[in-house]
Amino acid sequence: MSTGLSGPPIPEHTRFVFVTGGVISALGKGIASASIGLLLKSQGYAVSFLKFDPYLNVDPGTMNPYQHGEVFVTHDGAETDLDMGHYERFGGSVLTSLSNVTSGRIYEAVIERERQGGYLGATVQVVPHVTNEIKARLRRLAAAERADVVIAEIGGTIGDIEGQPFLEAARQFRIDAGERRVCFVHLTLVPFIKTAGEFKTKPTQHSVRELRAIGIQPDVLLCRAETGLPAELKRKIGLHTSVPARAVFAAVDARSVYEVPLNLAREGVDTRILEHLDLPARERRIEEWERLVERLQTPATDVRIGVVGKYVELRDAYKSLGEALTHGGFAHDARVRIRWIEAESLENGDLSPLDGCDGILVPGGFGSRGTEGMAAAAGRARRERVPFFGICYGFQWAIVEFARSRCGLDGASTEEIDPEADHHIFAKVRGLEGVERMGGTMRVGAVPCLLEEGSVAFASYGTTRIEERHRHRYEFMKRYRQLVESRGMVFSGSTEDGFFEVAEIPDHPWFVAVQFHPEFQSNPRRPHPLFRDFIGAALAHRDARKAGAADPVAHQGPASSGHRSRAASPG
């Protein structure tokens, strides 16, 4: 019988680490995976990542942000899980569509192959056909990346029905690759019951028992806990789970996700994983990360940024954005305090939630809800000369507000929101294939952009050619360019095929709006230049306001704010 086994063979030199989670969701598998990757890379190993998501959606591109959180976009245009952002930020990697696989994509491939006769008439089943397809994706990534270690996170919680094919595939993969080439890391919970005054290990015992019932014996246990675990407790957990006590580690609660790699390093998690994989442990080079955490814990100053968005009740919807703002603060030794403002709350004309903000940022989004609040926020930043950063939808509504207020186009809007508007400042580009339907039809992924010399954007990037990641369907209509520029807003960046990407107001301390998503390429060790300079402008605005001075000139490059700055390049 044909099993439908496909894909390249397992590279002989590659090892694999599977990360699973039990007891409850949201324990931090993504951060744990990213941290392990960082530590292995710090020892000189080449690391790549893969996230298996058990949901049946083909990708998260059409999913509600309140259910799924942020859709992270890779350089090659894949719409992926937000954990991919953690992998890139911690690992310093540039991942591709090969690194995120959903059940929907697996079943889609299996069914399509069956329809084409690829299984030679066999009865198509979860085992072996679905599990073979899952393993083929893992082998394909390993062959393409040629990494020393591939870290594969399996989403969901042990016991979820939808995750079972991935766990079964992982169990089989250890047989395929060999016992010492695969390491199973299980993240679990050890709660501290304050009334009893003690940690409880039963949830961990039950979680491991359920994992072993599937046929997987964990090699390493990461026990999420409020504080460190005593050695006696680790021995007890090891006894009941058949895991050596020296492979039971505390994953303690941290004030910041950036502290997690250092916590795991102190526990020796990476050393134990390398030991299991028969790889030599080397000297860790994490001094730069230690300095980064020190700056985060003891910043020299702070700055307040108002983020006016549609999904601020759920911070995960803006995960990369929040991290990029934090990175921008690193460059100036400043703590960024984000004031999350629901865009709808500004639509009644009361803009007081913006009071006291040193900078205003309007991020991406879709749909009509809150758009007038976004426009109002951009208008206030423009009139009161507060540093402003518009991203994707923020780019669109900053320009629509300018067209209404400064260009006399009272009926200006976007085709997305008002198909009957007198002036569609933004509209679908009908020449783009599939633009009329949903699901993978937007302009997604990295696109080159050319910047005008002498512009604010050019001062930030220090080059005329950049590449940034997109996720949008509507474009600025060129016929309005002359009018908009005649009233004081200029378009300083565009693609080679003529789409406008960057808008600025030169007669403003710092007003920049971009059609792309720069937050996806920000890294704590290399803050994105636009976020770096936006925070620098906000600090300058704060200082000038406190001193009662005139507007600072805050767009002359990364060091213009007068605060300590660290030059950076994107991605």
Image: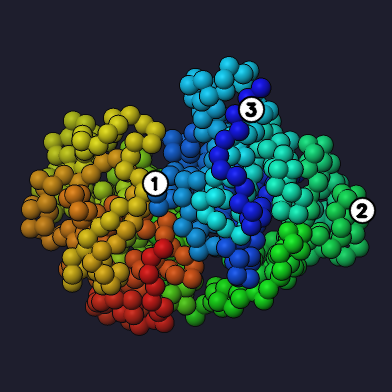
Q: Mark 2 near mark 1, Cβ–Cβ under 8 Å?
A: no
Q: Nearer the viewer, residue 443 or 184?
A: 184
Name the side, left or right, on which 142 lies relative to 361: right
Q: Mark 3 near mark 2, Cβ–Cβ under 8 Å?
A: no
Number of numbered discs present? 3
Residue at 34% across / 80% down in the picture? 559
Q: CA distance from mark 3 to mark 2?
A: 39 Å
Residue 424 drawn above or below residue 571? above
Residue at 71% across / 53% down in the picture? 181
Residue at 18% across / 70% down in the picture? 453
Residue 427: % across, % down: 21, 39
**Which colouring convention does the figure follow?**
rainbow
Query: Mark 2, residues whose alpha carbon is within 10 Å: few (<14), some, or many (≥20)?
Result: few
Earlier along the polypeptide chain: callout 1 or callout 3?
A: 3
The amino acid beneath tag 2 is Leu
Residue 12 drawn above or below residue 568? above
Earlier along the polypeptide chain: callout 3 or callout 2?
A: 3
Earlier along the polypeptide chain: callout 2 or callout 1?
A: 1
Image quadrant assignment for residue 417: top left
Residue at 44% across / 38% down in the picture? 61
**Tag 1 residue:** 77
**Tag 2 residue:** 239
Residue 469: % across, % down: 36, 53
**Tag 3 residue:** 3
Q: Helix, strand, or loop for circle 2? A: helix
